Image (tube, rainbow, N blue to C red):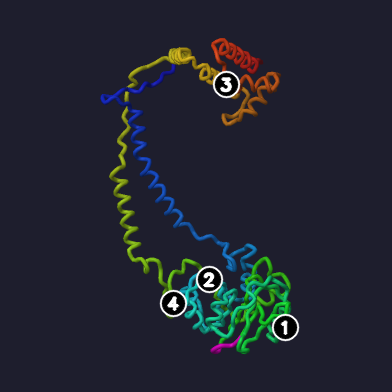
Amino acid sequence: MSASVHVDEVLGDGSTGRSRAAGRWRRSRPWLVVLGVVLLGGLVLTLPAPPTSSTPGAPDNPGGTGARAVARVLERQGVTVEHVTTTAAALEAATGDGTVLVVGDQWLTPEQVDVLLELDDDLVLVDAGWALSTLAPDVVAAGTGSTRSLREAACDDPDARAAGTITAAGGYVDLAGGATTCFPTDDGARGGAYVTFEQDGRRVTALSDLHPLTNAAVDDDGNAALALRVLGRHDHLVWYVPSFDDLGPVDAGGSGTSLTDLVPWVRPLTGWLVLVLVVTIVWRARRLGPVVAEPLPVVVRSAEATRGRGRLYRRARAHGHAAAALRAGTAARVAHRLGLPRSADAPSLVDALARATGRRPRDVETLIYGPPPTDDAGLLRLADDLHHLESEVHRP
């Protein structure tokens, strides 16, 4: 049986079928890349949100800076914990007779703070000194640069006395004297890390440091007792962690300002770009017709093809290419004979050949993967050595 090879037919314009196919591939690559980006973006948008986050103080964050442990314990005690990240969602979730927890205020605008402070729910502010000073101007932040330390309650508040001690940093000072201040610094400075007071029929509590609520510290001292008592006073808790994507102020009705409200032309422009992309793909794409069978213009016997390639190598003095072909053929045949897979690496093949032939692994490696010969004599010696190696492997 003889094998045959297909020689590309030269067309009238001097090109071949292979060169034309390569040209079409080069022209279509940019559009394929654009299509891949669009498909990947659509896939990302359709994926569900991850069940956990890495936001500090978030109830779905299982890391050291998260507060998932406190949220889970509150849920076991019958408290409904609703996690929100925008002011509009917080206003919608507030019931008027529950607790709203605000963790941090770095992303809040004055308008958002004003609307949050008008809620009828009990308010708990954690690491939100600016929002607290807006609500109660007589309570100001103090000792924000102090180090975290173990502090005694030193007040009459039941929640603070139940906790006994907490580990916290920073503090608040009540200039008017109408609030209860607990957990002062150990250096006797004025103020404390925990402030609570009544305002308009609701209870307002502020904690200067998020640390006592985190998963890494909730088991220390009385941190858990204080967190569970303050956040578990009602059956419904809105856990609000402000986010940077809460773009604009909100009104009392709870309707938020979205990106499309600020830039109304984003949505129609996006739709127009998608339409242009689809039209361009349909316009530039080439439809494949039915498969057409073409007779081979030239049939070349396998032995003639092998001799022709050998003459080309000899004329070009390509000893390295010829040696590589000989070594690759020998390696493939002996690997098949030894039962090795096509994906076997060089050390595995060398080790198997050394065991099968009794030769040293270094000699086998030099013969199969050594440097190429530089002349005809060296190439001939390599061919003989490879033949002897293969005959030893096939030896019964």
Report the amino acid beneath label 4.
Gly
N-terminal-most mark, 3 or 4: 4
According to the image, label 3 marks what residue?
A: 333
Query: Whole-Å distance between the Cαs marked 1 and 3?
Result: 86 Å
Viewport quadrant of the N terminus:
top left
- Whether 115 is among the magenta residues is no
Return the disc, 1 or 3, that comes first in the chain's sequence: 1
Labels 2, 4: front one: 2
Query: Where does label 1 land, which residue?
Result: 154
Q: Label 3: state its secondary structure.
A: helix
Q: Is residue 1 visible?
A: no
Residues shaded magenta: 197-201
Circle 2 sits in a helix, a strand or a loop, which is it?
A: loop
Q: Return the residue at label 4.
A: 254
Question: Which percent across, then down, holds residue 303?
Answer: 46, 13
Marker disc for residue 106: 2
Nearest to N terminus: mark 2 or mark 4: 2
Q: CA distance from mark 2 to mark 3?
A: 69 Å
State if disc 4 and disc 2 touch (CB < 8 Å): no
Looking at the image, residue 216 lies above or below residue 180? above
* Badge 3 amino acid: Arg
